[in-house]
Image: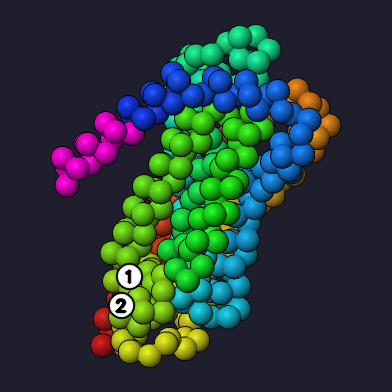
Amino acid sequence: MAGAALSALMGAIVQLHALEELVDRPVALFFASQRDTMFVQVAWFLTDFGKAYWFIIPAAVAFVLSRFVLRNPLYASQALFVLLSVAVTGIVVDIIKIVFGRARPNLLLNHDIYQFFFFRFGRDYNSFPSGHTACAMAAGVALALIFPKYRSLALAGGITLACTRFVTTAHYISDVVASSMIAVVGVLTIRVILARYGFPLSWGGAAATSPRHGLVAKTIGVPVDAPDTHTAPPRLIAPSVFGVVIAAVAMSTSGLLPNLALIEWQERSSPNFEPMVEGWLWLSLFVSVGFGALTWIFQRRVSLPQSRSSN
């Protein structure tokens, strides 16, 4: 496995380097000359749907509804899987962007700048890898794993949104390919981790396994000792509403919505606006996770003697 992983990594590096040296520049120059065509205009319309909030917000809403309204652990687990896939992939890509500091195609077209600057901040120097592509491909792969019957449609949607990034000269092809690789590896890794802890992602998985950790059961709303069943899982009645989850969702939403609204308004009102990495969003998520973990540990310690006495 280690040898296969190393071989795959070396192959990816060679492929990306070949794209950078031979393909990126001529493709960017070609699509820059086609900006007034209908094909590029359609790509400009579609490319905004690759932003993270098009996937994070619906997934978060679906999780809350499935967990607290429908009381369906399977749906809650699936929504959480999509949410984590997009969020984790986005965070990884944002970090890599800062490390490589690659100049965007607009600097090539306007100033003939085509290189990596490494640890260079600013929107014009975060081309590699593509954030839109990472979010779109992560969502597409996650949905393809959840709904295998419609995997072709899910993957086609993610690939289409990814291609709009180099068609609109917002990124180079190597940026898009690298993000796609990161998204696929990231989503498959998250799937393995969730499966190991007993998060169901399909009807068969929900019937064959049960959560292996109390926090998992509280998160998706199913008792740890729920009996296994070989039929499609019904709407399981969840325990009392877990206050930590509600607090985490509220804190994350309070950081997410104002940040997205501010970025959208500034991008539309100021053409030269350079949005920072969504610090409010990630900070709110980190605080929510930390607060939730500490509160859960405290509640577990308090409730532990009660459960022993009841036995």
**C-alpha gap between disc 2 and disc 1:** 6 Å
Q: Is residue 18 left or right of residue 67?
A: left
* Helix, strand or loop at mark 1: loop
Q: Is residue 234 visible?
A: yes
Q: Residue tagged by mark 2?
A: 209
Three-letter amino acid code at the position of disc 1 = Gly
Three-letter amino acid code at the position of disc 2 = Thr
Residue drawn at x 32%, y 58% is 193
Magenta span includes 102: no
Residue 291 position, x and y percent, is: 47, 54
Q: Marks 2 and 1: CB-CB under 8 Å?
A: yes
Q: Residue tagged by mark 1?
A: 198
Quadrant of the snapshot with the C terminus? bottom left
Residue drawn at x 50%, y 61% is 152
Q: Nearer the viewer, residue 275 or 6?
A: 6
Residue 297 position, x and y percent, is: 37, 61
What residue span does the magenta drawing correspond to? 1-12
Residue 292 position, x and y percent, is: 46, 58
- Disc 1 crowd rating (10 Å Cα; few below 14, some 14-19, many 20+) is many
Residue drawn at x 21%, y 36% is 6
Q: Nearer the viewer, residue 3 or 286?
A: 3
Which residue, as the protein is rendered here, is positioned at the far right?
A: 269
Quadrant in the rendering for residue 188: bottom left
Q: Nearer the viewer, residue 203 or 164?
A: 164
Residue drawn at x 38%, y 23% is 17
Magenta portion: prevailing SS class: helix
